[in-house]
Amino acid sequence: MEKLRILIPKGRIFDNVARLFSEAGFPISLADRTYRPIIGADWLDAKIMKPQNVGELLELGSHDAGFTGIDWIRESGADVVELLDLGMDKVRIVAAAPAGMDEGALRAKKLVAATEYVNLAGEWLKQQGYQYRILRTYGATEVFPPDDADMIIDNTSSGQTLKDNGLRIVAVILESSTRFVASRAAMADPEKRRRIEELAMLFKAVLDGRDRVMLEMNIPKDRFAEIVAGLPAMKSPTVAPLYGDEGYAVKIAVKKHEVPDLIPRLKKLGAGDIVEYDLRKVVP
């Protein structure tokens, strides 16, 4: 079979995607100054590219699937199939202006907007009724105001860099995260589609596993009905009788954020020998 060609962005996204592949069972290694990661599966072939290019390369059909932020998919207008929101590398695409420049000052002139997101910026500025000229940037957009631009449209995670450069957020244009996407040509090929959908299933299983833990406990017979009736579970608790007819062993997969309230409540109701452990994958 022809190898499945995967695009992975460089930088922070690469680290998160590499961890995802590894936890899915496909370890990745990347030597310094190379753009061809080695993945632990002979049917996968990967290449490192900038996230800005991933969507368009998939649309052109030179690769089958890849990872990039939804911001760059929207910016490029690439026609791709979104398979999974990984929920990683979350950023907001925002319009920001110098803290001392109010809305009236922005609308009283033909403002200069500095941005890497030329298409997203133009669409939003036009929609908002601004008179504007777009100045394309190639990184470090926040340094342009106030001397060289009146506004920037850029991505931010915490907003701290904007504050450090004397900027205030005027509007949030888009919320973005890393997505697993595929080319339409690959999804039209039955074998490639099967492989891509299997990868998506494994990635989702890893992400769901990160979000849950397994709780095991022993429950006395006389408290069983009361305790089990109130247990959260993906479908229903797994129950087995204890040796000697002493009660029941119960297992449940629960969200991590539920555990701090759940364990004391279970103990108070009479559950004992409670054990918590991490999950690696969860496949509903």
Image (tube, helix red, strand yellow):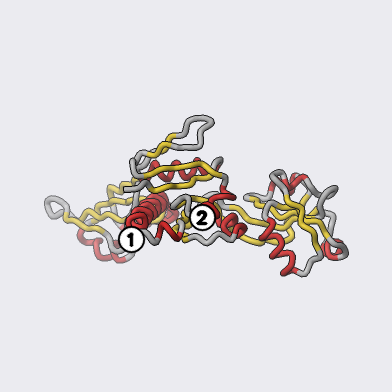
Eyeballing the image, is 222 above or below 36? below
Q: Residue at x 33, y 61 (%)?
A: 234
Q: Is residue 205 visible?
A: no
In the image: residue 239, left or right of residue 41: left
Eyeballing the image, is 139 above or below 127? above
- The earlier-in-sequence mark between 1 and 2 is 2
Q: Residue at label 2?
A: 60
Image location of residue 151, percent across then percent down: 78, 55
Q: Residue at x 41, y 36 (%)?
A: 38
Image location of residue 275, percent across then percent down: 31, 46
Q: Nearer the viewer, residue 10 or 169?
A: 10
Give the spatial CA distance, label 1 vs label 2. Answer: 44 Å
Secondary element type, mark 1: loop
In the image: residue 15, left or right of residue 163: left
Image location of residue 97, percent across then percent down: 78, 55
Q: Nearer the viewer, residue 60 or 232?
A: 60
Q: Hey, which quadrant is residue 23 in on the image? A: top left
How many marks the image carries: the answer is 2
Instruction: Determine crowd level at label 1: few under 14, some 14-19, many 20+ residues with C-alpha closer than 10 A.
Output: some
Q: Nearer the viewer, mark 1 or mark 2?
A: 2
What's the residue type where badge 2 is placed?
A: Leu
State the residue lying farthest toward the top: 32
Image location of residue 88, percent across then percent down: 51, 50
What's the residue type where badge 1 is placed?
A: Ala
In the image: residue 259, left or right of residue 92: left
Q: Residue at label 1?
A: 233
